[in-house]
Amino acid sequence: MVSIKLDSVSLVYKLHEKLTLSAPDRRVSGPGGRIESSGRKQFVQALDGVSFELKAGDRLGLVGPNGAGKTTLLKVLYGIYEPTEGSIAIEGKVDALFNINIGFRREATGRRNIVLRGLISGWTEAEIEEKMEDIIAFSELGDFIDLPFKSYSQGMAARLAFSAATALDPEILLMDEWIGAGDASFQDKAKRRMDELAEKAGIIVLASHNESLIQSVCTKKLTLKSGRIESLTTEPPKRMGSAAKR
Amino acid sequence: MIAALNGAVDDISKAMKLHRVWIALAHEDIGDQHRRTTLGPLWLLVNYVAFVGTFVFVFQPAGKDAAGYSAYVAIGLLVWFYLMEVMSTSVALFQREESFIEGTTLPLFVYVMRLGLQSVIRAGYAIAGCIAILIVSGSPVTFPWLWSLAGLLLILFVTPALTTVFAFLGAFFPDSQFIVGNLLRVGMFFTPVFWMNNGQDPIQKYAYEWNPFTYFLEIVRLPIINGEFPVHAFIVTIIASLLTWAIALLLLGRYRKQVVFLI
Ligand SMILES: Nc1ncnc2c1ncn2[C@@H]1O[C@H](COP(=O)(O)OP(=O)(O)O)[C@@H](O)[C@H]1O
Ligand SMILES: [Mg+2]
């Protein structure tokens, strides 16, 4: 059974340099996590006592100002960061899209990059072979697939990254803000694929500043502020466009 | 301690399951480094041969046999350059892989093996050059060459451990990147890479006996040069290798989840 459970998860970044030279008492509290210091070390409390549970079919939208802790939370869910405190239990195969360029090599062709990306995600060669044409078709990159990755625009890279990450039906898909990089028609396609994924009893966690994207994709909305949960609401997604007709 | 070892074994076994990843990435790396060059990786062979040639030309002891000295320098430089490359590229390993470490959940040992394989592929070209020099300079291919092969395998065995130790060193103490680079450059003169220890000069004798790298060189060199099995050198090397592995496993087990916060 696919599920995510976080129990009062906190995460503190330690910094060894001074963050700023201005006097701390005159600074207004910004949008980010809280900055604390002891001696030469400084700490940023990026997540503070975050608890929630997600079960199969849930689509969670993460919102909050810059520095609220959205990316950090996604990386904790993926397993890149171990929480400083609290515990986390995840059932299911996770795939993530943080930064479009991660795992892509500039000099290699799109096709070769799909292979590398697949290997990194732990796919077998047979699985890569099997999914290759699907991925290329979904990305609509056409002949560009045999050109080096460095010749792609941001939007094209986003298409390739999204197509590859969702090709093997991950049970849990984590996505950071950049999903807006593709053009409108691709975003529509991407939404449909996310719907399919969630209908197959998967979980999606999507961080975005795009309110309408969150509304059309997500069933739950978690608002973070300075690393704390400000609100967690459940709302039925407003289906729009082609996704509603199916 | 036990938990740390379990963690390290877990990381390593996951990385071994993902061997296709580091094999593919290492090949891409080599390809990228030599993209658009005419000779491609053959430059590695050219560089090595040019280096040996220069040393033989400049440092050849007058009146002694030239062939013996060519073999001495050829093997010395082969092993030393390999070790030096492994150590100096390892200190910045985690920093170089920052985007991967912060964006994927690949076990750290994947990066260690990727770098190790790269160094081995590069060393392959130098080995070809070394064998050519040995044959041209008239060293007969004899049974003790097998001991040299065993020596090379031992060096291969210690490579991932050496990379791990230096990579953690570089992650925890970024200054070490510069220190290690400098020490290695100086270290060449304190290691019997191109000079021979005749036991007369006390500094030379000291540098020979107390430098662990001496023994890594000698397990490959002595069998071919003297046709003997260097028992002492093998024992020292084996102990040094096991120690390095022990430190590597502890570091990997205990600190692998901290690395992402350090780089
Ligand atoms: N690698 C890091 N080192 C130190 N502080 C960090 C690091 N990454 C993020 N932070 C801090 O943690 C807080 C949350 O950041 P992040 O999760 O990236 O926010 P968001 O994605 O919501 O914009 C911010 O205050 C940011 O400054
Ligand atoms: Mg972010």
Image (cartoon, helix red, strand yellow):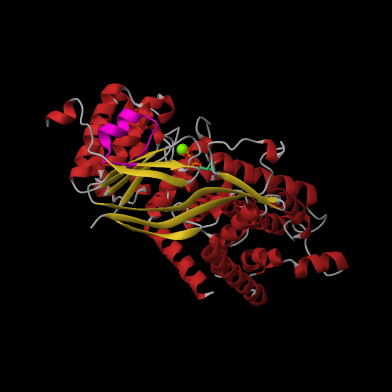
Residue B262 pos. (x, y %): 59, 51
Does the segment drawn in magenta span residue B7?
no
Task: State left or right for residue A14 relative to residue B192.
Answer: left
Res A103 → quadrant: top left
Vertical side of B251 occupied by B125: above or below: above
Say whether residue A18 is visible: yes
In the picture, the quarter occupied by the N terminus of chain B is bottom right
In depth, the one of A107 and B120 nearer the eye is A107
Magenta-colored span: A205-221
Task: State left or right for residue A138 relative to residue B134.
Answer: left
Does the segment drawn in magenta span residue A210?
yes
Say whether residue B126 is visible: no
In depth, the one of A154 and B181 nearer the eye is A154
Point 33% across, 33% down: residue:
A160
Vertical side of B90 occupied by A140: above or below: above
Task: State left or right for residue A197 relative to residue B124.
Answer: left
Residue A58 pos. (x, y %): 25, 46
Point 45% across, 55% down: residue:
A9
Task: State left or right for residue A125 relative to residue B94.
Answer: left
In depth, the one of B220 and A111 nearer the eye is A111
Res A173 → quadrant: top left
Residue B98 pos. (x, y %): 53, 45
Q: Residue furthest left?
A: A246
In depth, the one of A76 and B229 nearer the eye is A76
Residue A237 pos. (x, y %): 23, 35
